[in-house]
DNA sequence: AGTTCCCCATGACAGATGTCATGGCTTGTG
DNA sequence: CACAAGCCATGACATCTGTCATGGGGAACT
């Protein structure tokens, strides 16, 4: 019997996935969590064999949870399911020791199969997402450029970005200009959207 | 027995919700669809009692589907479930004749209860979403302002917005300026994000 | 030691953007 | 009808942004 921890902030989805996984004879959902922190705390207690984590949750990112679990419970395999699969996320997730990465568009038997695969030490990444990740390539942005671009996402004026990044406005403009050039966008807002779509920020 | 049509583009979620609803003795999922168009076509054939529709789908909006269903199948009650509930959506949905509106954060028994409620002619709107909708108020934007602001969402330069809206760049700037004033933002990008958060565009 | 890359900053310039005043046209309303 | 409100446009002005040149300091690699 494979013991599963399920973490997803959407109660309905979580309950539904639990119901679905429980239909399998060899799978058992032993715990559920609605937030990243809760997932980690629960995992410490119940020590599941496999953790199925949603990527986007209110507090901790799914990847952050995976990182913690990899450290604290090396025997527990972590896999991530997500609605909005961006290339960068996949890369970060694999770096964090995640063994499975799926979009929520897959069918239920694929999910069950992957749970079994990661439990026996295997890995599985959705082919479509993998292809996207490869085509997206590495981020050409320097760390600082990524920081600044992220602050620009909300549409804030440069003044405010500079304050929040503790930089001079001139420097901010330089970084943004560089980022705009690298992304082929025509202004920082477009560049920010582009970079987010690629998963670079 | 209440016959249900389930529409959601995420296969996993759809299957899971089907599994969950089928656990109830008086509910039966008689059809599933992955897109809006598919949902309408399927509904014409199977004539379900209740349609449970996801708000965001690749092609048609959940609200658009609800509108079609209300016309073609007046005996079928439509309810919408969504991950990202914005106030404006709720308003549009109710105008389209939707009888139930829920975020995916609700528990499974709430879902089942609401299915029964709408089937007997009742209505149900998630209290939290309702409160949000009320506090958001009506859109202060004129139709044209909303159009232009929507085009501004992607970060395009004014030149392009003007082309896409078939307006002079000067006019676009006037509308945007007005919208910026009404939203209290400091530039059009912030205004666009704000308006989207409020569900105005 | 030299080279390269990143970080941070400044200054200058052109072009994009936000704001305001103004005016003509249409539509709906008291 | 008079009036208000929305739609569309133009022009002028101040400010914001994007771009480029320049330079110092630090880390990494050859």
Image: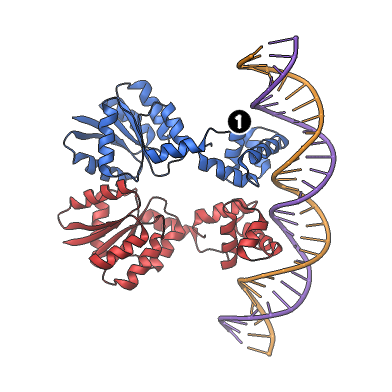
Chain colours: A blue, B red, C purple, D orange
User: Which residue was labeled with disc 1?
Assistant: A142
User: In the rendered view, would you say A97 is above or below B176?
Assistant: above
Residue B91: x percent and y percent? Answer: 43, 63
Query: Residue A96's quadrant in the figure?
Result: top left
Can residue A8 be seen in this snapshot?
Answer: yes
- Position of A167 with respect to B129 (left or right) is right
Query: Residue B50's quadrant in the figure?
Result: bottom left
Q: Nearer the viewer, residue B183 or B56?
A: B56
User: In the rendered view, would you say B188 is above or below A65?
Assistant: below
* Residue occupying image coordinates x 19% and y 62%: B2
User: In the rendered view, would you say C17 is above or below B137?
Assistant: above
- Position of A60 with respect to A189 (left or right) is left
* Residue occupying image coordinates x 22% and y 52%: B21
Residue B95: x percent and y percent? Answer: 41, 68
Residue B153: x percent and y percent? Answer: 57, 53
* Residue occupying image coordinates x 59% and y 33%: A140
Q: Nearer the viewer, residue A27 or A153?
A: A27
Residue B58: x percent and y percent? Answer: 41, 55
Of all chains, the one bearing label 1 is A
User: In the rendered view, would you say A97 is above or below B23?
Assistant: above
Instruction: Count neighbours of disc 1 (C-alpha within 10 A) and say few if under 14, some if 14 to 19, many if 20 or more.
Output: few
Which structural element holds mark 1? loop
Q: Nearer the viewer, residue B93 or B71?
A: B71
- Position of C16 with respect to A183 (left or right) is right
């Amino acid at each position: 019997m494979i013991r599963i921890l399920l973490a997803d902030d959407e109660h309905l989805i979580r309950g539904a996935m639990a119901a679905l996984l429980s239909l399998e004879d060899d799978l058992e959902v032993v715990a559920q969590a609605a937030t990243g922190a809760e997932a980690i705390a629960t995992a410490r207690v119940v020590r599941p064999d496999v953790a199925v984590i949603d990527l986007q949750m209110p507090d901790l990112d799914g990847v952050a949870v995976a990182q913690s679990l990899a450290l604290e419970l090396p025997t527990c395999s972590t896999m991530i399911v997500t609605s909005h699969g961006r290339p960068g996320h996949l890369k970060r997730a694999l770096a964090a020791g995640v063994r499975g990465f799926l979009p929520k568009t897959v069918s239920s038997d694929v999910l069950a199969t992957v749970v079994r695969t990661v439990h026996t030490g295997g890995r599985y990444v959705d082919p479509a997402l993998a292809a996207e990740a490869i085509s997206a390539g590495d981020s050409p942005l320097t760390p600082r450029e990524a920081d600044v671009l992220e602050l620009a996402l909300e549409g804030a004026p440069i003044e405010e970005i500079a304050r929040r990044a503790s930089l001079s406005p001139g420097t901010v403009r330089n970084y943004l200009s560089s980022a705009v050039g690298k992304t082929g966008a025509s202004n920082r807002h477009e560049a920010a959207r582009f970079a987010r779509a690629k998963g670079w920020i």
